[in-house]
Amino acid sequence: MKKILTIMAAAAALAASPLWAKKAAAVAPDSYDEIEPAEFAEDGEESAQDVAEDSDPYGKEKMRPKGERNFGEKLFGLGRFQQVDSFSLFVKSSVGTLHLRKKASLIYRDGTDIGGFYCYYDTSAFAVQLDRKARAALISAVAQYNDDFEAKRLDRGAKQRRTEAVYGATEVYEEYGIALANMNHAARAKACFGYEFVKGNPYFAIYVKKAKDLKYVKRTGDDTRMGETIPQRYYFTRAQAARLAEFLSDESIDSLRGADKDDAFSDVPPDDYSAE
């Protein structure tokens, strides 16, 4: 896969070992010898292309699973997206503890411009999905983080609230449930891009805010919190962030989308019409 940005390629090269192995090995945090921190620049104005977006990037028809699904797949909510490759990330639980590395998958939603990642968070499985504009926002955020990392502008003493959205925010689509085979809940949530120091080491961070459960039907006696998602915090070393950004590039997603079209005819042999 071609490089999407020179700075991201440099970040990916930092990892001397494969990004994923069968055995769960520790991922070393990024070293950060700090110098005097600089003030962050204010967010710039959105470009005309950023402002011009689809009327509904996560519309019902667009998010409807493509292709035929059997009864079991429909019952358990399977076949909505494909798991393209494995990678890893870190998560912070609802009690605020940074866990060891989590196994995750890079995912693509067939026939669309949507890619993302899937993993378990606390006691549920979450699939965080981004359309074209949201993917561009994440890729830009990773590039800005790498710039600030190299220039030593990351502020080790800053409060989490100040840095959790310093690289912007976007809308994402989530599907979730107690397991991959039971992801029958969905939400459209705000995802913020920033960073956080954990035990003295910086991580690129994606903070997905709680959002309304689009498929929740309230019943008498239900806890009011049952109708919304839990907030999630995902953390990435520079190599992990570069891997995610590379996968979410237009080039990567378009290639998967093109494969969908090619595969539609790949198993159907043409009719032989040779002259006798």
Image: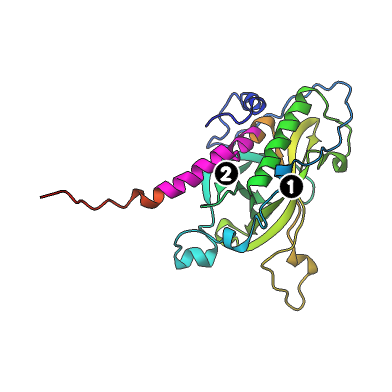
Pointer 1 local density, CA inside 10 Å: few below 14, some 14–19, many at least 20: few
- Residue 26 in percent (x, y) is at 64, 33
Judge left or right: residue 84 versus residue 151: left
Q: Answer whether residue 124 is visible to the viewer in this image.
A: no
For mark 2, give the secondary structure: strand
Residue reaching furthest to the left: 276
Residue drawn at (75%, 32%), measured in percent from left and top? 144
Q: Residue 261 placed where, x, y %?
A: 44, 49
Residue bounds of the magenta highlight? 242-262
Give the quadrant of residue 206.
Answer: top right
253 or 156: nearer the eye? 253
User: Cβ–Cβ below 8 Å for labels 1 and 2?
Assistant: no
Q: Nearer the viewer, residue 175 or 252?
A: 252
Type of residue at label 2? Leu
Residue 91 included in the magenta stretch of the image = no
Query: Which residue in the structure is indicated by mark 1?
Result: 51
Residue 274: percent from left, percent from top:
16, 48
**Residue at 71% across, 31% down:** 143
Q: Classify mark 1: helix, strand or loop.
A: helix
Provide the residue designation for mark 2.
106
User: For residue 168, what is the image quadrant?
Assistant: top right
Q: Residue 257 carries which label?
A: none
| Image position of 43 with respect to 118: above or below | above
The total of numbered circles placed on residues is: 2
Judge left or right: residue 153 versus residue 11.
Answer: right
- Closest to the observer, 235 or 211: 211
Q: Is residue 64 above or below residue 142?
A: below
Q: Percent x, y for residue 133?
A: 67, 46
Q: Who's the residue at 20% across and 51% down the image?
A: 272
Q: Which of 158 and 254 is in front in this view?
A: 254
